[in-house]
């Protein structure tokens, strides 16, 4: 496994090696040792998986707050996504900035998102399947959301608002100002 790009705030893009032959390919998709060598010493406690039927499905922006904040290791099993991590760590020099990474099953790349970031993605193909490992259990009382297309975040999503497919929860998520208690 190789770290192919380091983004701000500890966000890493990883590329597991694939070993191909006439049968297909094999890949080691997670190595605690490799991640630890790059500063990620977190223990994963839960795997989450989603399938999105249509292109332009938005899931997010979601996070869990302390004491149940989650780091996430995200990869795509089928299809492609535009994956987003927004730095919400108040003391961070990159506070309110986002990282956007395209992940695909064909490339096999992954992204590590440290705790303290909101996470979301947009599907770029129909029937996209995403798997992510998390460092804390789902805790409903710690769950928070931020409006995916908040102009204050200025995320360059690859879908028009009018055609984005969203859950009611994501459609009515608070703005960043509301999340921060500024309005």
Image: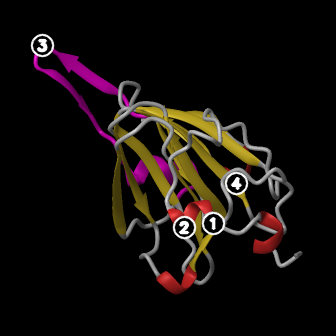
Return the disc, 1 or 3, that comes first in the chain's sequence.
3
Q: Which residues are magenta?
A: 15-40
Q: CA distance from mark 3 to mark 4?
A: 41 Å
CA gap, disc 4 to disc 1? 18 Å
Tell me the residue that label 3 is attached to. 22
Residue at the outermost top position = 22
Its colouring scheme is secondary structure
| Residue holding disc 4 | 86
Tag 2–tag 1 contact (CB < 8 Å): yes
Where's residue 39, x and y in %?
58, 54
SS under mark 3: loop
With respect to residue 128, does 9 lie above or below? below
CB within 8 Å, label 3 to label 4: no
Front label number (3 vs 2): 2
Please tell me which of labels 4 and 1 falls first in the chain: 4
CA separation in Å, label 4 and label 2: 18 Å
Q: Which badge, 3 or 2, is on the more N-terminal residue?
A: 3
Out of 33 and 46, give the one closest to the viewer: 46
> Which numbered circle lies on residue 169?
2
- Horizontal side of 179 relative to 10 (left or right) equals right
Question: Alpha-carbon distance for marks 2 and 1?
Answer: 5 Å
Q: Residue at x 42, y 76 (%)?
A: 137
């Amino acid at each position: 496994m190789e770290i192919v790009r380091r983004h701000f705030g500890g966000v890493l893009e990883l590329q597991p090696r694939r070993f191909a032959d006439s049968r297909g390919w094999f890949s080691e998709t997670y190595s605690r040792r490799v991640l630890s060598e790059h500063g990620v010493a977190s223990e994963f406690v839960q795997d989450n998986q989603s399938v999105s039927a249509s292109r332009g499905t938005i899931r997010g922006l979601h996070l869990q707050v302390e004491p149940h904040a989650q780091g996430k290791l995200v990869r795509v099993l089928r299809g492609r996504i535009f994956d987003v991590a927004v730095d919400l760590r108040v003391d961070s020099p990159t506070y309110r900035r986002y990282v956007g990474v395209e992940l695909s099953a064909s490339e096999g790349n992954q992204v590590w998102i440290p705790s303290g970031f909101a996470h979301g993605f947009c599907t770029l193909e129909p029937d996209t399947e995403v798997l992510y490992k998390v460092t804390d259990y789902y805790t409903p009382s710690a769950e928070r959301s931020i409006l995916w297309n908040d102009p204050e975040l200025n995320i360059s999503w690859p879908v028009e608002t009018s055609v984005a497919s969203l859950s009611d929860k994501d459609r009515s998520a608070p703005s960043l100002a509301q999340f921060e208690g500024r309005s």
